[in-house]
Amino acid sequence: MFSNEERQTERAGKYGTPRLEYLQQLVTEFQQTVSEEAKEQIVAHLANFGYDPLNYEYLRQLHVQDLFLDCLTEPNEKLVEFAVGGISNCCPDPSNAAVIVSSGGIPLLISCLSSPVENTVLSTVTSLYYLCTPSTRKEILIPQVIEVIRAYAASDTNCRFRNIATAFLGKYVDGKLFDNPNNHLAEETQVELATDNCDISFTGYNELV
């Protein structure tokens, strides 16, 4: 459920850490720690904040989207999984999407389609779904991406893969959304893509969760 300022005050408590300060603490700790486990926990926690539009401005101010993108090149599969989950959580917002695209996020996301981790692939397809616009379609709707997504749409064993991939193909490929100049759904239509991949809380990071 999305929050408002009054609700955030209730959740933080009278002496709770203000949201921006708390997020800054997480980012600083990520930058300073050498522990892979700590990095995983922090990125997963930051990803959870991406669900709430109230946090979007804070996340952009702290360059959290860039932090997520940097994690996509790491060999740590858990770190990649949580980072791409954070991207999928916040990229339905146009301002967040613009940051991700301008920071070179699309090629990094496309590389995640070959990940062996199910949640990583689910979050990647979800992210590409929201990032695909008339200005990015040539970068996203390339043969190798469409081929992979068609394979997921044909899956008989995983309904989550099938549902997300089918939604993507129906909107951008088979439905040819951008080919009709009278079709305004590119900006208006969204689909509920329930990946449930990054709703994770860790002991030690529960102050505002």
Image (cartoon, rainbow, N blue to C red):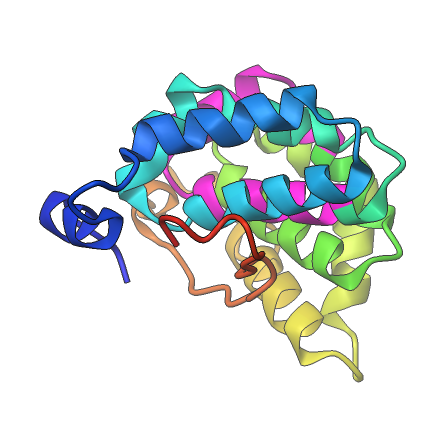
Most frequent secondary structure within the magenta stretch: helix
Up-down relation of residue 46 to residue 192 (above or below) = above
**Can the viewer see residue 177?**
no
Q: Nearer the viewer, residue 96 or 55?
A: 55
Q: Quadrant of the N terminus?
A: bottom left
Rendering quarter of residue 28: top right
Q: Nearer the viewer, residue 144 or 115?
A: 115
Asked if residue 122 lies left or right of residue 3, the reply is right
Q: Point out residue 30 in the picture as x, y percentages from the top left corner.
A: 64, 28
Above or below for 169 versus 5? below
Inspect the magenta stretch and tell me whether residue 124 lies in it.
Answer: no
> Within the magenta stretch, is there residue 92?
yes
Count of labels in the image = 0
Pick the residue in front: 67 or 30: 30
Which range of residues does the magenta coloring cover?
A: 79-108
> Which quarter of the figure has residue 192?
bottom left
Inspect this view and state whether residue 28 appears: yes
